[in-house]
Image: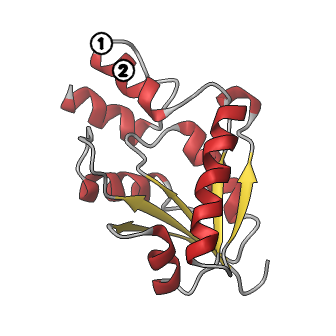
Amino acid sequence: MKDVTAVFPGTFDPFTLGHENLVRRAAAMFERLIVAVAASRQETLFPLAERVGIAAEVLRQVPNVQVVGFDCLLVDFLRQQDARIVVRGVRTQADFEYEARMTAMNRKLYPAMETVFLLPAEEYGYLSASVVREVARHGGDVSQFVPEAVFSRLQHKL
């Protein structure tokens, strides 16, 4: 969409091939896509600055994508970026129900906001960052689930 900035928010801890797939697909839909890496109140494997750096490295060849960290309400971030479109990936009905509740709340706070839901590519329908973290923490091979830049950092970190 011409002259439209969309935001794809998440903690991206770690950034997976599923995330990359969704970002590349969303980037083809919008003139500008901001991958908004959220600070987390919960403990993360990678600190915010490193998660931003990893996502930027993975997505560096996607010209209309910008990676930005944020630590505020999503609706406030949208306003700061002059954006009103949020892109979210949903794998399951449970994901959709959670995201629908979040969308309803965010729309109360920012009525101009719209959410676009994308289903993951079939090969990533089961993939989540939390599962990748658990497998990696227990010494499992996660190389088929994450970009190389993430895999090398996971090996070093764990």
Between the residue at mark 2 and the residue at mark 1, the CA separation in whole angstroms equals 6 Å
Does residue 81 appear to the left or right of 95 in the view shown? left
Quarter in which the C terminus is drawn: top left
How many C-alpha atoms fall within 10 Å of the one at disc 2: few (<14), some, or many (≥20)?
few
Q: Does any portion of residue 63 appear in the rendered image?
A: no
Exactly how many numbered labels are in the figure?
Answer: 2
Q: Is residue 113 left or right of residue 80?
A: right
Residue assigned mark 2 = 134
Instruction: Please give the label number shown on residue 87.
Output: none
Mark sitting on residue 138: 1
**At 52% from the left edge and 77% from the top edge, which residue is drawn?**
78
Secondary structure of the residue carrying numbered label 2: helix
Q: Residue at x 28, y 37 (%)?
A: 153
Q: Is residue 79 above or below residue 9?
A: below
In the rendered view, tell whether residue 128 sits above or below residue 15. Answer: above
Depth check: give the residue in front, 58 or 126.
Answer: 126
Residue 65 point in image, percent of width and height: 55, 68
Would you say residue 31 is visible in this rendering?
Answer: yes
Residue under the point 70% across and 39% down: 120
Residue 4 to residue 89: above or below: below
Q: Is residue 9 left or right of residue 2?
A: left
Secondary structure of residue under mark 1 = loop
* Residue 50 horizontal side relative to residue 114, left or right: left
Q: Looking at the image, which residue is at 37% across and 32% down? A: 151
Quarter of the image where the N terminus is located: bottom right
**Label 1 crowd bin: few (<14), some (14–19), many (20+), radius 10 Å:** few
* Amino acid type of the residue that numbered disc 1 sits on in the rendered structure: His
Measured as percent of width and height from the top left, residue 58 is found at 46, 51
Q: Quadrant of residue 83?
A: bottom right
Picture coordinates of residue 118, whole percent (x, y): 74, 49
